[in-house]
Image (spheres, rainbow, N blue to C red):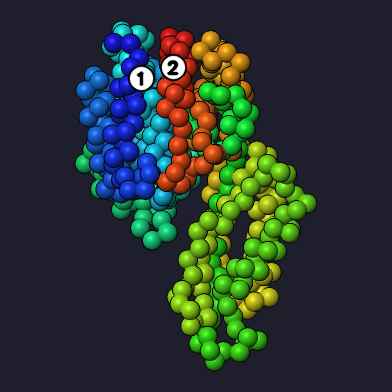
Amino acid sequence: MPLDPQRFTGDLHVLRSFGASGVGKGVVRQAYSDADYAARQWLAQRMKDAGLELHFDPLGNLFGLAGEKSLLVGSHSDSQPEGGWLDGALGVAAGLEIARAAKEDGRPPISCVSFQDEEGRFGVLTGSDVWTGKLALAEADGFTDTQGNTLADMRAQMADLAGGFLPHDRFCGFLEMHIEQGPYLEEAGLGLGLGVVTDIVGIRDVRITFEGRQNHAGTTPMHLRRDAFQALSAFNTALSSRFENVVTPATVWTIGHVALHPNASSVVPGRVEFSVQWRDADADRLARMETLIKATAQEIAADHGVASELGPVKGLDPEAMDARFQAELGAAAEILAPGKWQKMPSGALHDAANLAAVMPAAMLFVPSIGGISHAFDEDTAEADLVLGLQVLDRAARVLAV
Ligand code: GLV
Ligand code: MN
Ligand code: MN
C-alpha cells in the first residue's frame, strides 16, 4: 500500500490519547511516565503490525527495524511536563508511516525510531545522547529530575524489554520531521511553508542553588536577611545586563525552573534551586556566556550573604545538517510545494543534532500555528502535516537506496 496520509494522521491522534491533558490537544507524557510507557508499548505494537522488528535499547529508545541496513526516520514520543501533541510525536508517526509504506511496497528498507527523553527530564537529549556516545550510560544513570528521581531508577522500569545498543552502521542516515516551534515559517507568509534545516543551535544548561537563611517574614529586619529569592532576582537582572555586550538578537536564555524553599508567604526563603539555559549557534559565545553566569552567580551570592552551588553544565554543540540530505529534502519540497519552502536554522534542539555525529542527518520543518510550542495549544494545520509527510517520504525514497 502506498503512503497513507489518513493512517498517519490517525496514528498521530491515537498517540495524543496517551497522556491527553484535557486542555485542547495537549499532552502530559514525560519520559518514563506511565503515559510514556503506554505510548511506547502501543507504538511497538504498531511497528510489529507493520512487519518491523522491534528493538528497545537500555534507555528505552524504541526502534522498528527493517532490513540489514536501512535509512532511519523518526523523532521522540516523550513530552515536556506540559506539551503539545506534535512535538516529537509528529516525526515518530511520520517515521512509522514511511517505514510501513516502504515495506508494503517492497522498497529499500526504512526503519523508524522513537527516542527517549528528548525533552531532557534527566539530561539534554538523553536517549540519543547516550546512543550516539556523547554521554556515558553510567554518568547518565546518576542524573536526577527536578523531583530527585534518578535516571537509573526510571529506566529500570523498562529493563525487562531492553536489548543492547544497536550499532550505528546499521543505518545509512537519519531523517527527522518536526514542527518548527517558532514563528518564522508563518511569518514568511509562504502558505503551506516548509523548512529544510541547515543547522541546529547549541545549548548549555545548569542548575544553580542559592542557600541563604530561612527566617520569620515579620520579625527579620531587611538588613539582616539572607533571602534566596532576592538573590535570584538580583542575579537575573545582573545577568541580562552583563549579557548585553556578548549576545546577538538570535541568542536566547531562560530561567525556566525555580524551586523556592519553603515557598510560603510568611517565611523569608532560605533556599532556591533554579535552572539557567542558554542557546546560540556559536560555541564560543556559549562559552563566554557560561563564564559570565558563573561569575555573576558568585558575585550576587556574596552580595546577598547566600552560598551558591553550581551543578554540572550539560549541553550540546551547534551541529550542521548533511548537505546531500538537505539537498534531497529541498528537491522533494520543490516538486511537491514549488517556491513554498526555505532553508533555515533550528533554534530548538533535536535528536538529529546527535545523530549527525554518527551518520548523515537532516530535518524537515512544518509551520507551527502562532509559533507556539512547549504548551498545550501547540498546533499545525493537518494539510501542512500531510505535505510534510509526503516531502519526507519522497526524500527518503532516494536516500534509502
Ligand atoms: C527540545 O525540545 C528543546 O528544548 O529544544
Ligand atoms: Mn521535539
Ligand atoms: Mn520539545
- Can you give x and y, in whole percent of width and height, for residue 55 in the image? 28, 30
Labels 1 & 2 near each other (Cβ < 8 A): yes
Instruction: Tell me the quarter of the image containing the C terminus.
Output: top left
Ligand 2 within 8 Å of disc 2? The answer is: no
Tell which of 290 and 277 is nearer to you.
Answer: 277
Amino acid type, mark 1: Pro
Q: Mark 1 points at which residue?
A: 5
Q: Name the residue under label 2.
A: 390
Q: Image point 45% across, 29% down: which residue?
A: 381
> Residue 209, which numbered label?
none
Query: Which of the 4 quarters of the picture holds residue 197?
Result: top right
Task: Determine if residue 157 is in view.
Answer: yes
Task: Determine if residue 126 is in view.
Answer: no
Tell which of 396 and 367 is nearer to you.
Answer: 367
Under tag 2, what secondary structure?
helix
The 10 Å Cα crowd at callout 2, few under 14, some 14 to 19, many 20 or more, is many
Taking the image as shown, residue 329 lies to the left or right of residue 233, namely left
Under tag 1, what secondary structure?
helix
Q: Image point 63% across, 47% down: which residue?
A: 252
Amino acid type, mark 2: Gln
N-terminal-most mark, 1 or 2: 1
Ligand 2 within 8 Å of disc 1? The answer is: no
